[in-house]
Amino acid sequence: MVKGNPTLYESNNVKGKFSSPGHGADIPERPPVPNDNPAVWDLVIQDMIDRDKLGTKRYGVRLQPFNGRDSLWDAYQEALDLVVYLRQTIFERDSEKMKKLEWNTNELETLLRQVEAGVITRNELRELFEKENKDGSKSE
């Protein structure tokens, strides 16, 4: 960056505006947990095979070197699209989590008011939470 010239990031003052609390590109993820789902490598390899077939159908030839295109620019443009789609998905996922959290907070406040008013008992409230935690119907 040239001194005195703010970057697009700095000049638009977007720092922190669109990130979720406790999440970000600088926070490492926890280790993966084994499960019964297919290996992602297998899924990716099948996707590659499918894309190769689609490309052959669309262009009449498989992708080869020295084909007259600038593959570095092709890849760069695809990477830009990828980053935008990934960030869109992260924002949408985190927004949904926040909506659920806000809803759960509002629901909790309503239930607490009902306990205070004697509409439901503390034991009934406890049973509701235990049921919700067992079936996961309203929480993730």
Image (tube, rainbow, N blue to C red):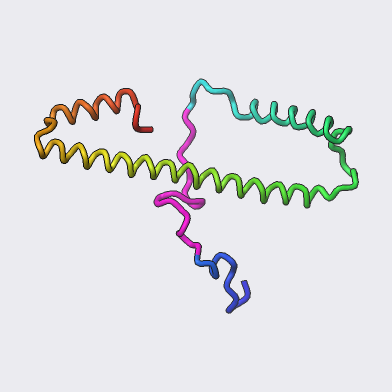
Front residue (pair 1, 135): 135
Location of residue 53 by image quarter: top right
Residue 114 horizontal/vertical position (percent): 15, 37
Is residue 21 highlighted in magenta?
yes
Q: Residue at x 34, y 42 (%)?
A: 101
Is residue 36 highlighted in magenta?
no
Residue 123 horizontal/vertical position (percent): 13, 28
Residue 94 horizontal/vertical position (percent): 45, 44
Identify the residue at the far bottom of this view. Answer: 4
Q: Looking at the figure, which quarter contains the N terminus?
A: bottom right
Q: Residue at x 55, y 48 (%)?
A: 87
Q: Is residue 129 left or right of residue 54?
A: left
Front residue (pair 111, 126): 111
* On screen, residue 77 above or below 140: below
Identify the residue at the far left of this view. Answer: 118
Residue 58 horizontal/vertical position (percent): 83, 34
Location of residue 124 by image quarter: top left
Q: Looking at the figure, which quarter contains the C terminus?
A: top left
* On screen, residue 3 above or below 134: below
Identify the residue at the far top of this view. Answer: 36
Q: Is residue 36 left or right of residue 55?
A: left
| Magenta stretch in the rendered image | 14-33
What number of labels is visible?
A: 0
Q: Residue at x 17, y 39 (%)?
A: 112
Q: Residue at x 49, y 23 (%)?
A: 35
Q: Main secondary structure of the magenta part?
A: loop
Q: Is residue 110 left or right of residue 30?
A: left
